[in-house]
Amino acid sequence: MPLLTELRDKATSIYKHCAPNGAKGRHEQQVTMVENDFTALAQKVVEQWRNENVPLNTGATEDELLSFEKRFALTLPPDFRYFYSLVNGMTEFESDKYFFYLWPLEEIAAVMERNKALLELLDEETKENGERMGCLGILGEGGGNSICSAISRVFRVFPVNQKEPSSTESVRQPSSFCKIEIPFGGYLIDSHRYFLCQDKKKRFFVHSQVNVGERLADNFGHFLQLYLSEPDKLYL
């Protein structure tokens, strides 16, 4: 697994230059434990899909992953990156037994660029109010600027108090907290979507369109864990 080895070596190399000597061994052990957690989960999910004959794309190459990161000026979290090195989404219009469809990187990129173009059509005031209400998420990509603007004007007089998220179970995280939002899957022919979101503190978590801003999983590895053990918590 060259990708996984490279990620581990980079993390260890950086730490060796700044960590006290006594902490190096503990850190390397901790890196291995975390690494084993999400790699085992990823492999188990892929194995389950293969046993169920879910049509899967070949894993993304390192060049494809780097190209995606460069295209959007971001760094994918290790758990998400590793999973996509195993399987680059499902083949078009195919899904698993829960009707969950994992998007290929190219489809993710196309949707991200389309959403960015739509947002650029909105003026700053409309965009802020539209995102606060989840306007784009509710109406979909074809919702139209005029509708979003009208709804925004109606609700502009009602202040919205936004609080910083604190836990997976109780927090409703508005999309305005997302510095980066990566759609990676859908349910029942895009009935609702799943997003990998990076907050302002650069922490990644997963949310969906079912309850806009609800924090479903603390990271992508946690999403895989819930998928295997408690899919109903992911609205599957």
Image: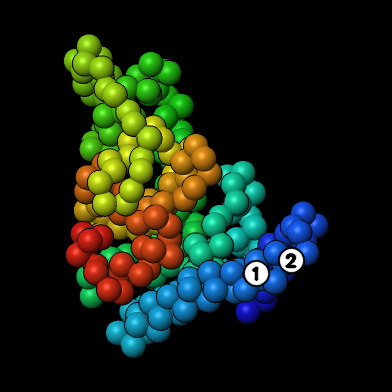
Image coordinates for residue 149, horizontal then vertical, percent: 28, 19
Q: Residue at x 36, y 40 (%)?
A: 165
Q: Residue at x 22, y 48 (%)?
A: 210
Numbered tag placed on residue 22 in the rendering: 2
Q: Secondary structure at mark 2?
A: helix
2 or 1: mark nearer the eye: 2
Which amino acid is tagged 2?
A: Gly
Image coordinates for residue 74, horizontal then vertical, percent: 59, 47
Which amino acid is tagged 1?
A: Arg
Numbered tag placed on residue 26 in the rendering: 1
The answer to whether marks 2 and 1 mark residues whose Cβ atoms lie closer than 8 Å is yes
3D distance between C-alphas at marks 2 and 1: 8 Å
- 147 in relation to 212, above or below: above
- 236 in relation to 125, above or below: below
Quarter holding the N terminus?
A: bottom right
Q: Secondary structure at mark 1?
A: helix
Quarter holding the C terminus?
A: bottom left
The picture quadrant where one finds residue 121 is top left
